[in-house]
Amino acid sequence: MPPVERWQGRWASEEDTQAFARRLATSPAIAHATLTLKGDLGAGKTTLVRHLLRALGVRGRIKSPTYAVVEPHSAIDCAVMPEGEPLLVWHFDFYRFNDPREWEDAGFRELFASPGLKLVEWPERAGEFLPVVDLQIDIQPDDMTTPQAPIDPDQDTQRSVQVTALTATGRRLLEVLE
């Protein structure tokens, strides 16, 4: 059977987002991966990151890096790490970048070269400077309705999700989603 390259799904609620994050957090490949999150403002990128970080064991406040550009995190008791070794995580948000060269000027090359998980929102704003990406997650509002599941206008939580593996590490991450 050929390796999995793509996963497509639908999140009908935030609980579905959380369940997806929990599955992703079970893969040992997550410990040293780079994931990009694509989608419009309000698509649920930061919500997914929060659920993923919680599933990995990050404690304390998890805030969006929209203004700081990067927020570091660590998980001391992460199940995918050897006992006593913390999982290091960097959550990037390049939304405010006006020029991809800002990535280079900010000195992110060293962070991306170091061990740990890198989560990148608005990766297209870093252009060609962004290093190899293992897994690309594209989140879009899902307005698909059926008689069994009509959209509640007060609940804008339904999402269409496409996950694409771009490396062998990405393919290992996709395995836990099947």
Image (cartoon, grey):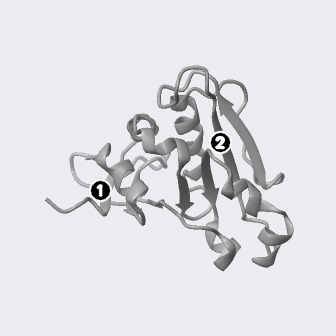
Circle 1 residue: 145
Q: Is residue 119 above or below residue 24?
A: below
Q: Nearer the viewer, residue 134 or 96?
A: 134
Q: Which of the 4 image quarters holds residue 57? A: top right
Q: Is residue 110 above or below residue 157?
A: below
Q: Amino acid at mark 1?
A: Thr
Which element carries disc 2, helix, strand or loop? strand
- Give the image location of residue 33, x and y in percent: 53, 51
Q: Residue at x 62, y 51 (%)?
A: 118
The answer to whether residue 48 is seen in the rendering is no
- Give the image location of residue 139, x and y in percent: 47, 59
Q: Residue at x 76, y 51 (%)?
A: 70
Q: Which of the 4 image quarters holds residue 99? A: bottom right
The answer to whether residue 107 is seen in the rendering is yes
Q: Nearer the viewer, residue 21 or 109?
A: 109
Say few, some or many: other residues with alpha carbon within 10 Å of mark 2 (under 14 / 14 to 19 / 20 or more): many
Q: Quote the CA–CA distance across marks 1 and 2.
A: 37 Å
Q: Amino acid at mark 2?
A: Val
Q: Nearer the viewer, residue 24 or 108?
A: 108
- Give the image location of residue 140, x and y in percent: 46, 62
Circle 2 residue: 89
